[in-house]
Image (spheres, grey):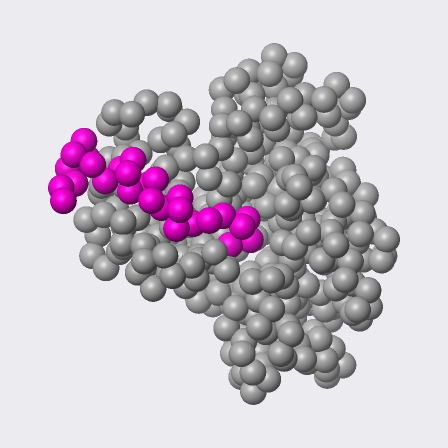
Amino acid sequence: MKLGMGMMRLPLLDENDFTSIDYEQLNEMVDAYMDAGFNHFDTAYIYHDGVGEIAFKKSVVERYPRESFKIATKLPLFVITEESQLEPIFAEQLKNCGVDYFDYYMLHNVSGFTENAWKNVDLYSFIQKKKEEGYIKHIGLSTHGNSEFLEELLFEHPEIEFVLLQINYLDWEDESIESRKCLEIARKYGKPVMIMEPYKGGFLADVPEEAEKIMKDYNPDRSVVSWAMRFVANLDDVCVVLTGASNLKQLENNIHEFKNADPLNDDELKIIEEVSEIINSNITVDCTKCRYCVDTCPEEIDIAKIFDLYNKHKLLEIEEWTQFGNAYLNYSKLDGVGIASDCTECETCIEECPQQINIPEVLKDVAKTFENEIYGFTD
């Protein structure tokens, strides 16, 4: 099993501009990751508002020999409407990444949200052809669909060699995500699994105090993050655990936790069940900050950022001024951004959300919570 470096949430020079990659820090992160003995990088066409693959090229390809690393990227089903788009986009991705071939290439988020692409365009034949031509070493898919949907995909497309799945202890028995059941389906069809969201967008790195206390009472020397890493790092048939990092310290912590991820014992597994119940009772919005919704919002609302502030505010369980409401006010004053009340309920975001959140409905409560006289908003 390998620790993969996910390049979805890279360090930024301007936290409100996802194209402003902090390359000095990113290069330090890549060097630390490679020095630790790992070499699997994961990116995508749409990451960081379209510059994610280019960031990989600058920080890895231009600084390391090709044989020293593996690269995984994904065909952006979100933008595919006809077959004529496939060749140009694939060629653009090779150029963006600065490579002659991809080690792993996936259909990105095969689900009901992208069915216009995979139902109307022969994507599977295309990636199989690219593999035969030598431009791809291994073909796969990522999905946030449930186990029944995954089984249909793998039954109909035996050419798929691996799958990228959302797996963590919070989603293990979740009735919508079905992490455990999806892993079992992948095993049934003999497909190696890569894991995404092992920390569930940061939820499992910053758990409620009640949950943290239970973990620390059992083992004060273990970090909260270590429980999440140990859970995924010891699952059978998993080949890569992808973790994202927004700074060097986070990356170093990921490396440390992976290298020290001994199996959970029966008592610890019971504690994780208890912790999951506590976390679920405290989460207001189950957002992992993937930003797919942000990329398609016509009102340019940074939904992921707003939901993060909203979740943190709600955890305090107070109705007056908080630092998170103040951060929302500061965000609202930026040029060219939409605020929660700007939502027109077009529902484009719902179609893109892997977590199936009714985003327009939540934005109404965000507006009610943050856009009031306490924070200087007026009608």
Numbered disc total: 0
**Is 370 part of what is drawn in magenta?**
yes
The x, y position of residue 327, in whole percent, is 27, 38
Q: Residue at x 72, y 69 (%)?
A: 139
**Residue lying at 60% horizontally and 57% vertically, measured from the top left:** 41
- The residue closer to the viewer here, 174 or 83, is 174
Answer yes or no: is residue 331 visible: yes
Residue 142 position (above or below residue 93):
above
Q: Which percent across, then down, holds residue 301?
A: 32, 55
Above or below, 356 relative to 56: above
Determine whether, in the image, residue 335 is placed left or right of residue 43. left
Q: Quadrant of residue 256?
A: top right
Query: Residue lying furthest bottom in this view?
Result: 84
User: Of all residues shown, which one is farthest toward the top?
Assistant: 217
Quarter of the C terminus within the rendering: top left
Left or right, 149 with reference to 81: right
Q: Residue at x 55, y 53 (%)?
A: 354
Q: Nearer the viewer, residue 175 or 223?
A: 175
Q: Which residues are magenta?
A: 353-379
| Percent position of residue 238, x then y | 76, 48
User: Can residue 13 be seen here?
Assistant: no
Say whether residue 295 is magenta: no
Q: Position of residue 183 (x, y in %)?
A: 76, 48
Is 79 above or below relative to 24? below
The image quarter containing residue 311 is top left
Q: Measuring 37% from the left and 24% from the top, which residue is drawn there? A: 316
Task: Pick whichever, 58 or 273, lies toward us.
Answer: 273
